[in-house]
Image: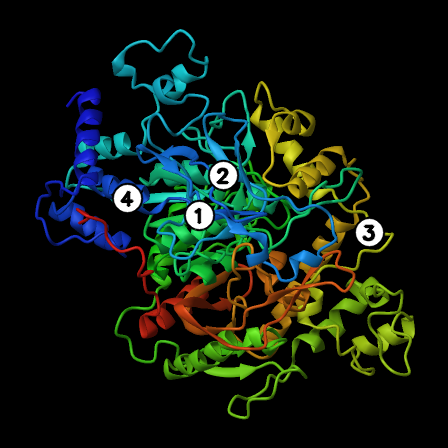
């Protein structure tokens, strides 16, 4: 069939689906899209129960139904605002909600507030496309919104690019482009969109699909907006007006997914530029104040919401990767983590998350926050699907190596020689974890506040599942966690190993000072900074500071005068822009000249990043490199000395906050959960249950009335919609196969993954 006719047929069938009709299928009634696996999809294609085109059409229909906006502006009076319109997604223009939330419904005692004027929520045209509006300023989540806003751009002709929008993306078969079309659009329009690629696959293979060479055949996937794609708008979620908003070439991981047969379907909404690494400080100060947690938010795409409760956040910064998989808007998604950016969206949205050792999946062609820690991860609905995706990143000739990413040289010595799918535990196997020792990390199960209880108690219950599967459990010891007499203690813990490793490799830690200038660590009768103490501690002849533990070392160093910071994000963005080679946006200066940001605080932060001179004496980079090497040694010694195969703990101990609401205070107490990204080691996170109770944090006005502070909740609230959480397994570099074995055995025994009930099959969905 002629290419143009293929496209027309696809669009006509898609239109019929939106009208509620069911497209014809080879054997209707067998294949079901919701919660389908890669294996089930391939079986259905071979049986003629569906076609690749019909699968993509069905996902587009779900995006049309469920990818709408789910937040409302926070205003002074709470009055409705005029109807505003967003970008086109799935063939129709998105409508913004007209409702707003009054500030006095969000915070108490607002009549006594004396602080800086607030950055109230409002609608504003985007710089990239003035016909498209977006929410700026403070926003709040909408209960039962009916949408999650998880995908910021779909790979659909006419809407996949702003530069080549509408008629400037007309199929080549329609004739010449208009005379005013931007020059890059002629080459761009020759690239097939998701529907056209599906039609090509159907024409080439029909039922005779080759999953040996294309293991991701016809798998519609999203990927975090920081990963470049040559056939979609690629701006990291920013409202940045590039000369050409699609990237000149695919990021390596997108190219490898494409080669493996995946449908390059959508960019997943993220916290713009991976969260943008905060504000490095500088002359730019926000003129307006923001209040409340924002969740994963972009200036171009808006905010994504939790599919289990759309009033709540999703975890950042890969929020859209988690939500799009959870709500069955895609089959799998590629996230990115610098700290918790894969782990948090995985647990908050109840999806499997596999993050391999740093370097296994290339980061080439992506916008990062800290190149030393940034690494891709995989979100799917099952461990088996995630393993298939992981294997797909191995090139037949070069393996996992990619010349664009120097970290990918490491897998040469640690990558599995056999497919990772071979590590999955076979179904029905009795006691599949017999002979394995699993270490329970109690340092990460301390209840700092009542809000930590629901997840930690839930994970404790799940430990019995691991024992029933044949695993032997041992636990580390923490003075803030009551010892469990039913589980033996390790004979050598993290603090024992830290005492042996840190006095030589990172002695400067013992000299850290608190904000008031007093020493952070101390041992009665010792000067912990002296050579005598350091030597004695390393030989276990002097006590180790009780508060220098796994949680603390994974947190940030104190902000002292000798901390030279601001190098990582400033360097990475400038490097990315130089490599991209855009005619308009070339560096930090031209980026900020051609972009706008969703709050005054974000505008000030990006201005400061652009103005900040990079100091090559950076302490930050040196510290993170030393910490990784030292703490990997600590970790491996604990594993080996106790003959432990895998560690287990919660990936996060608190449930998601309400968008615009108060965040859990004292988050630094829980900083230890960032161990995975900071150590660059593999992690597997698997759905472990649902919590039906939450302890909501709240706002309180400071005594001087100048600012709002947050306090931890003390009273339980029964949730109308239970919220999911995951269990975390982790091990040493290159031990992905061991983690997949444990994770798949646990998953098969529990089946905790459940789709969000508010997003069922749409009319006509197979």
Q: Tell whether 629 sits left or right of 470.
A: right
- What separation in Å lies between label 4 and label 1 (alpha carbons)? 17 Å
Nearer to us of marks 4 and 1 is 4
- Which residue is most to the left? 27
Q: Position of residue 283 (x, y in %)?
A: 80, 38
Identify residue for label 4: 59
Residue that badge 2 annotates: 227
User: Reading the chain from its start, which is encountered first: label 3 or label 4?
Assistant: 4
Q: Position of residue 124 (x, y in %)?
A: 53, 33
Structural distance between the alpha carbons of marks 1 and 3:
33 Å
Q: Quadrant of the N terminus?
A: top left
Residue placed at 61% from the left, 68% from the top? 636
Task: Tell me, yes or no, if residue 263 can be seen here.
Answer: yes
Tell me the distance, in whole angstroms, between the alpha carbons under discs 3 and 4.
Answer: 48 Å
Label 1 close to label 3 by CB (< 8 Å): no
Q: Residues within 10 Å of mark 4 (few under 14, many from 20)?
A: many
Mark carried by residue 53 = none
Provide residue 488's location: percent of width, then percent of height. 55, 89
Q: Which residue is mark 1?
A: 334
Identify residue for label 3. 563
Badge 2 vs badge 1, beta-carbon distance below 8 Å: yes
């Amino acid at each position: 069939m002629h290419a143009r006719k293929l496209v027309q047929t696809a669009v006509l069938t898609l239109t019929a689906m939106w009208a509620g009709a069911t497209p014809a299928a080879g054997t209707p009634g067998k294949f079901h899209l919701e919660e389908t696996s890669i294996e089930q999809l391939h079986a259905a294609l071979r049986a003629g129960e569906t076609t690749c085109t019909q699968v993509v059409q069905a996902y587009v229909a779900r995006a049309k139904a469920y990818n709408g906006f789910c937040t409302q502006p926070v205003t002074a009076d709470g009055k409705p605002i005029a109807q505003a319109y967003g970008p086109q997604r799935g063939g129709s223009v998105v409508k913004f909600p007209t409702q707003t939330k009054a500030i006095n419904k969000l915070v108490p005692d607002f009549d006594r507030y004396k602080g800086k004027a607030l950055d109230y929520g409002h609608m504003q045209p985007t710089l990239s496309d003035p016909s498209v509006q977006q929410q700026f300023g403070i926003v709040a989540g909408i209960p039962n919104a009916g949408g999650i806003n998880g995908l910021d751009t779909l790979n659909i002709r006419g809407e996949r690019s702003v530069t080549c929008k509408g008629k400037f993306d007309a199929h080549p078969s329609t004739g010449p482009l208009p005379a005013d079309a931007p020059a890059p659009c002629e080459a761009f329009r020759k690239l097939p969109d998701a529907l056209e690629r599906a039609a090509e696959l159907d024409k080439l293979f029909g039922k005779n699909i080759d999953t040996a060479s294309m293991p991701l055949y016809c798998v519609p996937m999203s990927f975090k907006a920081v990963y470049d794609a040559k056939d979609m708008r690629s701006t990291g979620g920013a409202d940045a007006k590039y000369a050409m908003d699609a990237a000149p070439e695919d990021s390596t991981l997108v190219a490898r997914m494409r080669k493996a047969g995946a449908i390059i379907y959508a960019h997943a909404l993220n916290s713009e530029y991976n969260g943008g690494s905060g504000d490095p400080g500088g002359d730019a100060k926000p003129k307006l104040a923001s209040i409340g947690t924002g969740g994963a938010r972009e200036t171009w795409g808006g905010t994504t919401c939790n599919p289990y409760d759309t009033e709540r956040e999703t975890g950042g910064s890969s929020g859209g990767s988690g939500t799009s998989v959870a709500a069955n808007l895609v089959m799998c998604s590629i996230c990115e983590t610098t700290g918790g950016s894969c782990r948090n969206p995985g647990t908050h949205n109840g999806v499997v998350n596999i993050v391999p050792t740093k370097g296994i999946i290339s980061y080439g062609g992506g916008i990062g926050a800290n190149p030393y820690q940034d690494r891709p991860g995989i979100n799917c609905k099952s461990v088996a699907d995630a393993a298939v995706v992981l294997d797909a990143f191995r090139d037949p000739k070069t393996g996992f190596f990619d010349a664009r990413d120097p970290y990918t040289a490491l897998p040469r010595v640690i990558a599995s020689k056999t497919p990772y799918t071979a590590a999955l535990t076979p179904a029905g196997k009795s006691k599949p974890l017999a002979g394995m020792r699993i270490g329970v990390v109690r340092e990460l199960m301390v209840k700092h506040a009542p809000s930590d209880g629901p997840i930690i108690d839930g994970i404790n219950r799940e430990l019995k599942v691991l024992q029933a599967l044949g695993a032997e459990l041992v636990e580390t010891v923490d003075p803030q966690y009551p010892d469990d007499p039913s589980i033996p203690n390790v004979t050598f813990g993290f603090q024992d190993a830290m005492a042996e490793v840190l006095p030589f490799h990172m002695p400067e830690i013992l000299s850290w000072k608190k904000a008031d200038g007093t020493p952070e660590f101390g041992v009665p009768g010792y000067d912990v900074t002296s050579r005598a103490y350091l030597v004695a501690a390393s030989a276990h002849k002097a006590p180790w500071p009780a508060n220098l533990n796994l949680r603390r070392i994974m947190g940030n160093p104190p902000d002292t005068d000798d901390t030279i910071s601001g190098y990582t994000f400033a360097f990475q963005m400038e490097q990315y822009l130089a490599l991209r080679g855009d005619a308009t946006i070339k560096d930090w200066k031209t980026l900020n000249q051609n972009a706008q940001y969703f709050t005054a605080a974000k505008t000030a932060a990006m201005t400061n990043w652009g103005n900040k001179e990079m100091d090559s004496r950076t302490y930050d980079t040196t510290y993170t490199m030393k910490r990784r090497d030292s703490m990997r040694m600590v970790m491996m010694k604990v594993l080996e000395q106790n003959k432990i195969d895998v560690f287990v703990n919660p990936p996060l101990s608190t449930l998601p906050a309400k968008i615009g609401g108060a965040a859990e205070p004292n988050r630094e107490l829980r900083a230890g959960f960032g161990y995975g990204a900071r150590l660059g080691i593999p992690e597997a996170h698997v759905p472990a249950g649902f919590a039906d109770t939450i302890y909501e944090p709240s706002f309180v006005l400071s005594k001087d009335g100048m600012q709002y502070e947050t306090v931890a909740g003390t009273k339980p609230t029964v949730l109308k919609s239970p919220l999911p959480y995951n269990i975390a397994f982790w091990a040493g570099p290159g031990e992905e196969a061991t983690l997949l074995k444990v994770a798949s055995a646990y998953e098969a025994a529990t089946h905790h993954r459940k789709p969000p009930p508010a997003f069922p099959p749409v009319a006509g969905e197979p």
